[in-house]
């Protein structure tokens, strides 16, 4: 198969440059395209406006441009656009079949910080805090970048963080994840025991391996093996995360049994705790 080149990327877009105003929504990432033959940078514009009139002509769209290996390694491409800023750019529209979001190839950045009341109004509305108030979970605040509702709840007499992953445009997903967390809180004594038991069952043998390794480097401090009951008592719950599908993870500090790694216990309401591992 013929190796694809940057020329093949450019050929996906029209030949004519168009001047547009774009309101940058997110940071910039890079990945390989065309069978891993070259790098392309991507960022998203929350909206696009006409340069002459300042009127909004497009909702969210993707801005792309090719990178050389040298440009990608230098990393300066990630600073080309700043979130929340309005830019005047030259770009070419995707000429293939319509995609879920308009795709533009950015050929030149002409100006940064361009005044545009229509786009500024969109940004003000976009960044307005969205709060979700719940009688059990308290006040949760939307993190738009991460698509999560974040907050604090009481668990076994202590405060733990909660982060509920949602699909922003689907309110049903908001209800689903809050219901999962509320059911965990409602039966927290039972869940606390079962989550700790899963962590202890899966990870106590590994903790003793780490303990043995530590003892080999410091033979004057040999310790008794860690029991499952001791393991379950020592770990400290700090956070719950819930995915849009309803799967949740309880996150624990390890009390240095794994030298500062984090312990994650996964589960569902239906199956209970299903797995545990160390991360970080």
Image (spheres, helix red, strand yellow):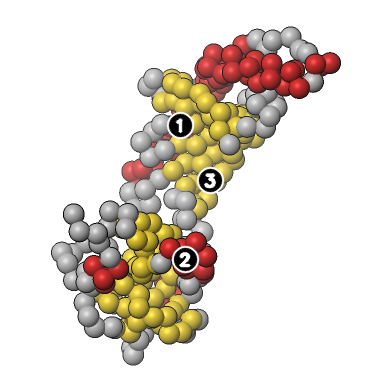
Residue 163 seen in render: yes
The nearer-to-camera label among 2 and 3 is 2
Q: Which mark is residue 195?
A: none
Q: Residue at x 20, y 59 (%)?
A: 2
Q: Position of residue 145 (x, y in %)?
A: 47, 55
- The mark nearer the N terminus, 3 or 1, is 3
Q: Residues within 10 Å of mark 3 (few under 14, many from 20)?
A: many
Q: Residue at x 42, y 38 (%)?
A: 243
Which residue is under mark 1? 248
| Cα–Cα gap, marks 2 and 1 | 41 Å
Q: Secondary structure at mark 2?
A: helix
Relative side of 163 to 172, left or right: right
Vertical placement of residue 8 versus 238, above or below: below
- The mark nearer the N terminus, 2 or 1, is 2
Q: Position of residue 83 (x, y in %)?
A: 49, 68
Q: Secondary structure at mark 1?
A: strand
Q: Residues within 10 Å of mark 2 (few under 14, many from 20)?
A: few
Residue 127 seen in render: no
Q: Secondary structure at mark 3?
A: strand
Which residue is under mark 3? 150
Q: Residue at x 48, y 72 (%)?
A: 80
Which residue is under mark 2? 70
Q: Position of residue 89 (x, y in %)?
A: 38, 81
């Amino acid at each position: 198969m013929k190796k694809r080149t940057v020329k093949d990327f450019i050929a996906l877009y029209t030949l004519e440059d168009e001047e547009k105003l774009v309101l940058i929504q997110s940071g910039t990432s890079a990945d390989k395209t065309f069978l891993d033959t070259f790098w392309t940078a991507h960022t998203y514009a929350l909206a696009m406006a006409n340069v002459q009139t300042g009127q909004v002509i497009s909702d969210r769209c993707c801005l792309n441009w090719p990178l050389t290996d040298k440009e990608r390694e230098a990393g300066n491409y990630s600073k080309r656009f700043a979130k929340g800023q309005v830019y005047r750019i030259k770009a070419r529209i995707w000429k293939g079949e319509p995609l879920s979001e308009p795709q533009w190839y950015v050929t030149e950045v002409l100006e940064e910080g361009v005044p545009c009341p229509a786009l500024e109004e969109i940004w003000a509305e976009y960044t307005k805090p969205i709060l979700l108030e719940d009688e059990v979970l308290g006040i949760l605040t939307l993190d738009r970048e991460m698509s999560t509702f974040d907050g604090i709840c009481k668990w076994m007499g202590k405060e733990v963080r909660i982060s509920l992953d949602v699909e922003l445009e689907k309110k049903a997903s908001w209800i689903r994840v809050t219901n999962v967390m509320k059911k965990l809180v409602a039966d927290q004594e039972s869940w606390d025991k079962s989550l700790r038991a899963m962590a202890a069952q899966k990870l106590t043998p590994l903790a003793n391996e780490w303990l043995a390794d530590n003892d080999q480097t410091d033979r004057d401090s040999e310790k008794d093996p860690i029991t499952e009951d001791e393991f379950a008592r020592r770990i400290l719950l700090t956070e719950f995360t819930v995915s849009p599908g309803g799967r949740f993870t309880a996150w624990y500090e390890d009390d240095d049994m794994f030298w500062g790694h984090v312990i994650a216990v996964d589960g569902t309401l239906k199956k209970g705790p299903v797995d545990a591992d160390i991360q970080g």
